[in-house]
Image (cartoon, rainbow, N blue to C red):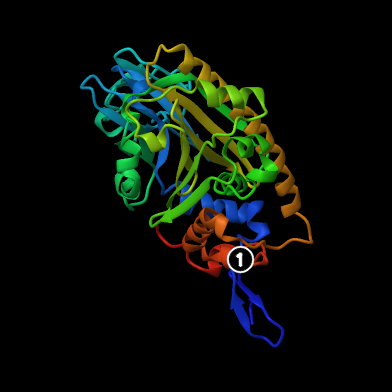
Amino acid sequence: MAVTADMVERPGGKARHISHTLPAWTYNNAEFFDLEREHIFMRTWQLVCHVSEVAEPGDYATLDLSGERVFVIRGQDGRLRAFFNVCRHRAHAVVKEQSGHCKNLIRCPYHGWTYDLAGNLKAVPHEKDFPGLDKAQYGLRPLDIEVFLGFVFTRLGGSGPRVAELMAPYRDELELYRIDEVQPIGKNWHEETGVDWKNVMDNFLEGYHIPTGHPGLYRLFGNHYEVETREGGVARAYSWMRDKPSTNWSERHYQKLLPPVEHLPEERRRAWVYYSMFPNLAFDLYPDLISYFQVLPTGPGQSVLRSRAYGHPDKRREMRAARYLNMRINKQVYREDVRLTRSVQGGLASRSYSAGVLCAREACVKQFHDGIRAVLPVAGCIEPPEPGSMAGLDSPRAM
C-alpha cells in the first residue's frame, strides 16, 4: 500500500488515519514551488495596503509577488484600481517605490510612456516613430481589486470567492475594531526570512509552541489560547491576558498601562486575537493596535515577511506607552520565531525526517496543509516524484 501524507502503515498492512504535516520535500523543491506559484499565489487574493495609504488621487502602493509586480492607485474620480506594474512598451515598472504619489499622470521612468490614473495610455514620446500605434490598445493591464474593511486586495487570476465571502464568518468580530478608520503607525516592514513560506505560516498558525518557544507570551497569557477553523481557509486564534503580573518589565508595564478601548466589548479589551486567510495572510488584532502579517514566497525554501501596524488616533500617554511596549514584546517574539523556523528549515532537509504529526492544538496548521493538498494533490506524496514528472502526476485543482 502506498503511504500518503494522511496515512501510516500498521504492522499487518492495515492503515490508520492520522493527521500528518505536509511532506518535508515540499518545503524546498523547485518544481513544487512553480506549482504553488501558478496554482495558489496567482489565483488567490493578496493584500496590498490599507485605504489610508492611498487616500488621495494619485496615491499608490505596490506589491511584488513571486516575480509579478502590481500596484493600486486612486484615480481622479476617487476610485481605487489595480494594475500590473509593467509598462506596455518595454516592461519597465511604471512606479518604483513601495508607495508614493503620481500627480495627475503615471509616467514610466524608462522611455516616458505616460498613462492617466485610470491606466489609459495618454502620451508616447516620438509617437510618429510608432506607425499605426493605437494607444487605446496599450493601457496598463488591469487586475481584480476588492476593499474589505479598509484593506485593499488584488488577485492576478482565478475566479473563487471574494474576500468578503471568505471572511464572512468573522466579519462581525472584525467590525468591532473599526479597521477601516485606522491610520498607519510606523513604516512598512519587509524582511527576508531565510525559510520557505509554508514554514513561516506553520509557525504562525499554532500556539502549541508558546510555552517553550515564547516565554514572554506564556507569561502574558499562560494557556489561555483557543483556536478554531472555518470553511474557506479562514481561522481564528484567541488569547487573553491573565491577571498575574509578568516578571518581565515590558510585559508587566503593558499589562498595567494598557488603557480601555471604548469601542471594544469588555471581553476584547485584554485579548490578542489572530485571524488568518489562506494561503499567506494573517491579521493580529490587539486592543491598542492592529497589524497584518503576509508571507511572500520568493523561491524554493525562501520568502519575505511583510507587515505594518495601524491604530486609531489616540493621544493618551498610556496608549502611546502600550503601543511601544506591544511592539517591543512582539519584536522579541519575532526574533524567537526566526530561530525556530530556521531550525525547522534545516531539519526538513534531514534524511531522518519525511513528515510530522499534528495534535488538536495545531488544527489551523492541519487546515492550512489540507488546503494545499486540495489544490496540489501531489503534496500528498511523502516522497518527492521523479524530477520532471510532478506536473503530470496529477492535475492541480482550481481555487
Residue 39 seen by the camera:
yes
Coordinates of residue 287 in the picture (x, y in percent): 43, 29
Q: Nearer the viewer, residue 250 or 94?
A: 250
State the residue lying farthest toward the left.
77
Please tell me in which quadrant of the rendered image residue 391 appears.
bottom right
184 vs 40: above or below: above
Q: Is residue 244 above or below residue 20?
A: above
Q: Quadrant of residue 380?
A: bottom right
What kind of residue is marked 1? Ser
- Of residues 149 and 4, the one drawn nearer to the viewer in this rendering: 149
Quadrant of the snapshot with the C terminus:
bottom left
Quadrant where the N terminus sits is bottom right
Determine the residue positioned at 66% across, 64% down: 384
Vertical placement of 2 versus 232: above or below? below
- Which residue position is annotated with label 1? 389
Q: Residues within 10 Å of mark 1 (few under 14, many from 20)?
A: few
The location of residue 234, given as percent across then percent down, is 42, 50
Relative to 325, is 92 on the left or the right?
left
Towards the viewer: 209 or 157: 209
Q: Is residue 13 left or right of residue 184?
A: right
* Residue 329: percent from left, percent from top: 60, 28
Does the rendering let one see residue 140? no
> How many numbered dots are placed on residues in this image?
1
Q: Secondary structure at mark 1?
A: loop
Of the pair 390 and 340, the residue shown nearer to us: 340
The structure residue drawn at horizontal position 46% and vertical position 33%, both measured from the top left corner, is 270
Farthest residue to the bottom: give it: 12
Instruction: Locate residue 303, reporting x and y percent.
Output: 60, 40
Q: Residue at x 63, y 85 (%)?
A: 14
Q: Is residue 164 above or below residue 353?
A: above
